[in-house]
Amino acid sequence: MTTSATRVFLARLAGVRVFDPNGEQLGKVRDSVIVLRSQAPRFTGIVIEVQARRRIFVPMSKVTSIDANQIIVTGVVNLRRFAKRPNETLLTAELLDRTVDLISTGERVSVVDVGVELDRTHDWVVTQLFIQRGSSGFRRRGERKVVDWQEVSGLLLPSIDQDATAMIASIATLRAADIAALLHELPTKRRLEIARQLDDDRLADVLEELPEDDRVELVQLLDVERAADVLEDMDPDDAADLLSELPPERAAELLQRMEPEEAKDIRRLLSYDELSAGGMMTTEPVVLSPDATVADALAQIRNPDVSPALASQVYVTRSPTETPTGRYLGTCHFQRLLREPPATLVSSLVDSDLVPVHPEAPLSEVTRTFAAYNLVALPVVDQNGHLLGAVTVDDVIDHMLPEDWRENDGDDHG
């Protein structure tokens, strides 16, 4: 087997693209598989994501070129879903941050990366460890250095006090859905360690992508104050869905700890049936007053915190523009906004033909309305014509799919 590198540090492969011999991208590296043993541990293959949430195993015997920029594989790749065997260890999910002992000094150090080399038998084996000391032992705090793998003990056994620093660094650039898929595969203790080190807004995004059982478990294990802060950073409809899945006592405690305005919106959503427009809507659509301009509207929908579905429409209402708003006047579609001069008033561009739904409208009615008008978002108004929020197409799809759709793409392998 010819390779473009004969020594590789595996943590640097996270996110590297994998190609076939014709240059077609197969996917991206999500983890590396190592078999720990008393002699030099073997690097047996990579786990790549070939489509959203589908991970497969590619053995090193299929790899013809590997470096920190790209990996090329040859032959037929087995598309069967990856399932870790008992004798295998995942680098990112399990080995990074493992605490080991330096044999020469007895110092406790953590594994930051693992170096592998191609040996004479064309097997990839672990030869070096990139390690880090915490507060003492080396010349300065946090110093890192490379040692031979034989210079440490404890590599073969999981550490009970490992932290998640290196793993956080390795997943920093992943999408929230990818991080959620990774957390789903981890033991509860490890999952909680990672969650505790994620920023509030990042953890909020990840919770929205996790299967129901996983997110309920995490929110119950987190400190109450931290859990309340994270809920405040979630979309109100997602936060309401999550709270409805918790034991009533825990949900009430979290609502009590949240900021009053945030809690008010969520309580309002919880008052509706889950499968109604009110139960699915978000209370934070883009709303402008009639005297706002096209320039104002475009500035609002450019906000990266606004989801693509919500950015597709701007709702025009009388004051106040916080939900529940003043009287709903109509909807401006972003395609129309792009075609008009910046100084044009949005009130002159409203689509009055789009009929909003009431919060009690069932899922079936909401779905028919989306299909009839080819919508990606739908305004929700009360009986007095005040805008309460908007239902987005992703919320509708979420409620139409089976509850376990995040865990199963319909083609799982045992």
Image (cartoon, helix red, strand yellow):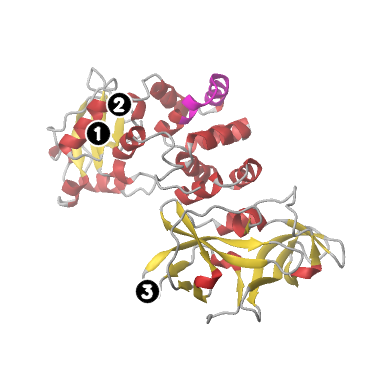
Using the numbered discs, state the Cα–Cα distance from disc 2 to disc 3 in whole angstroms: 46 Å
Q: Which residue is mark 3?
A: 23
The image position of residue 246, as x and y in percent, is 53, 26
The image position of residue 36, as x and y in percent, is 70, 61
Ranked by sequence position, the earlier of labels 2 and 1 is 2
* Position of residue 369 in the picture relative to residue 412 (left or right): left
Circle 1 SS class: strand
Tell whether label 3 touches label 1 (CB within 8 Å): no
Q: Amino acid at mark 2?
A: Ala
* Position of residue 128 in the picture relative to residue 279 (left or right): right
Q: Amino acid at mark 3?
A: Gly
- Tell me what residue is drawn at x 26 percent, y 20 percent: 382
Residue sitting nearer the eye, 198 or 4: 4
Ranked by sequence position, the earlier of labels 2 and 3 is 3
Q: Which residue is mark 2?
A: 277
Q: Which residues are magenta?
A: 242-256
- Tell me what residue is drawn at x 53 percent, y 75 percent: 67
* Position of residue 86 in the picture relative to residue 136 (left or right): left
Q: Amino acid at mark 1?
A: Leu
Ranked by sequence position, the earlier of labels 1 and 3 is 3
Using the numbered discs, state the Cα–Cα distance from disc 2 to disc 1 in whole angstroms: 9 Å
The image position of residue 313, as x and y in percent, is 24, 41
Tell whether label 1 touches label 2 (CB within 8 Å): yes
| Residue 324 visible in image | no
Residue sitting nearer the eye, 280 or 341: 280
Is 50 included in the stretch rendered in magenta?
no
- Main SS of the magenta part reads helix
Are there few (<14), some (14-19), or many (20+) residues within 10 Å of tag 3?
A: few
Are there few (<14), some (14-19), or many (20+) residues within 10 Å of tag 2?
A: many
Circle 2 SS class: helix
Q: Which residue is mark 1?
A: 378
Are there few (<14), some (14-19), or many (20+) residues within 10 Å of tag 1?
A: many
